Image (tube, grey):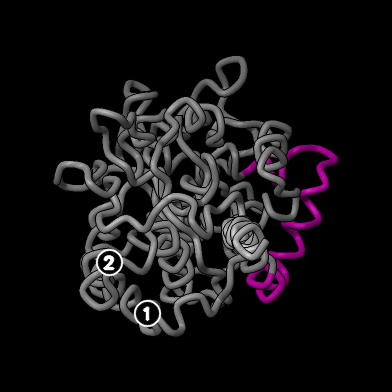
Amino acid sequence: MGSVWTAIFVVLAAISVSHAQLSPTFYNQTCPNVTNIVSGVITSAAQSDPRIGASLIRLHFHDCFVQGCDASLLLNNSATIVSEQTALGNNNSIRGLDVVNNIKSAVESSCPNTVSCADILAIAAQVSVVLAGGQSWTVQLGRRDSLTANLSLANSNLPSPFFTLDQLKQNFSNQSLDTTDLVALSGAHTFGRAQCRFFDNRLYNFSGGNPDPNLNTTYLATLRQLCPQSEVGRNTNLTNLDLTTPDIFDKNYYSNLQLKNGLLNSDQVLFSTAGADTIAIVNNFSANQTAFFEAFAASMIKMGNISPLTGSQGEIRTQCNMVNGASSGLMGVASAESQDGLVSSM
C-alpha cells in the first residue's frame, strides 16, 4: 500500500504544480535581480531607440492573444515550427526581438535555465511603462515557454487597426477581457508610432470617397502631407500614435480621442461610436490619469494571466527564438519601419 500511496501522491503533486498560480515572488530565491537586469537592458536600448518601450509592450500583447502568454511569438521558423511572426498582425510590424534576445542573454548569465521568455516579456512590458512615466504594478511570474507556435491562431486572434468597436469588443471578449480592459489597454497607444498604411484609408476614401468624419480636419491635413493619396495602402512612413506627448506614458491618448485626434480607426471608435459604453470610460481616463494608470495596471495583470503554462508544462528556453535542443540561429528582427502599441496591423 505504501508504494501505491506514494504513486498517488506524486501524481497529485504533478497535477497541483502544473496548475500552479502565478506569483510575484516566483524568482525571489532563484533570480532575485531579474527585474533589475531587464530594466538595465531596456534602459540602454531606449537611449538609441525611444520606441522600444511601446514595441516591447506590443510583443507581450501579441504573445498573450495567441495560445496564451507562452512566448510562442518569439519562436522563429524551423523544421517543426511555423513562426507567428509572419501572421497578418505581425509581419513587418513587430520589433524589439533583438532587445528580448539581449535581455535573455543577460538573464541567462546571472540565472541560467531559470527565467522563462514569457516572464521576460511580462517584466519588459511593466518596465517599459515605468520608464516612460507610467505607473508600476506587481508582475505575476512563473510562466513557462511553449514548445509550439500557432500561425493560424495568430491570424485569427490578433485585432486589426481597421476594426469597428463591435469587432474589438468581440476580439477582447474572446480572451476574457471586458470593455474596460479594451479601453485601458488601448491606452498603450499613448506612446509608439504607426505606419501610414494602417490609417491612410481614413484620409481619402473612408466612406463614399470622403475622409473619416471622425478625424479632426487640422490633423487630417497634417497626415495627408505625410501620407499622400498615391501611396495609400503601401506607405510605410511613420507618425506618432499620440501627437501631443509621443514618448510619455500619460492620459493624453484619451484627450486626443475627445478632439478627434485618434490616429487609428481602432483608437477613434472608442470615443466616436454613437451611444457606445466606451465613451464614458474614455472621458473618465482623460479627466483622471490615476484612474487610467490603475485600470491599465489591472488589465495588464489580467492579460498576463491568459492561459499561462506553469509547473512542468512547456520548458524554460535558453534562447527565446528556439526551443531547447534546436539548431542555433539568430532571433529574427522585424523591420524598423513598424507599428508599435497594442492594436495589431493587417
Vertical comparison of 8 with 66: above or below: below
Q: Residue at x 21, y 47 (%)?
A: 331
Q: Residue at x 52, y 40 (%)?
A: 66
Which quarter of the image is occupied by the N terminus? bottom right
Foreground of the two, 176 or 53 = 176
Kindly identify which residue carries mark 1. 31
User: Which percent across, then down, holds residue 305?
Assistant: 61, 57
Q: Crowding at label 2, few (<14), some or many (≥20) Cα neighbours within 10 Å?
A: many
In this rendering, would 153 be left or right of 81? right
Q: Quadrant of residue 236?
A: top left
- The type of residue carrying mark 2 is Ile
- The type of residue carrying mark 1 is Cys
Q: Which residues are magenta?
A: 268-294
User: How far is mark 1 from mark 2, CA to CA?
Assistant: 14 Å
Kindly identify which residue carries mark 2. 103
Foreground of the two, 171 or 273 = 171
Q: Is residue 140 magenta?
A: no
In this rendering, would 7 be left or right of 99? right
In this rendering, would 188 be left or right of 195? right
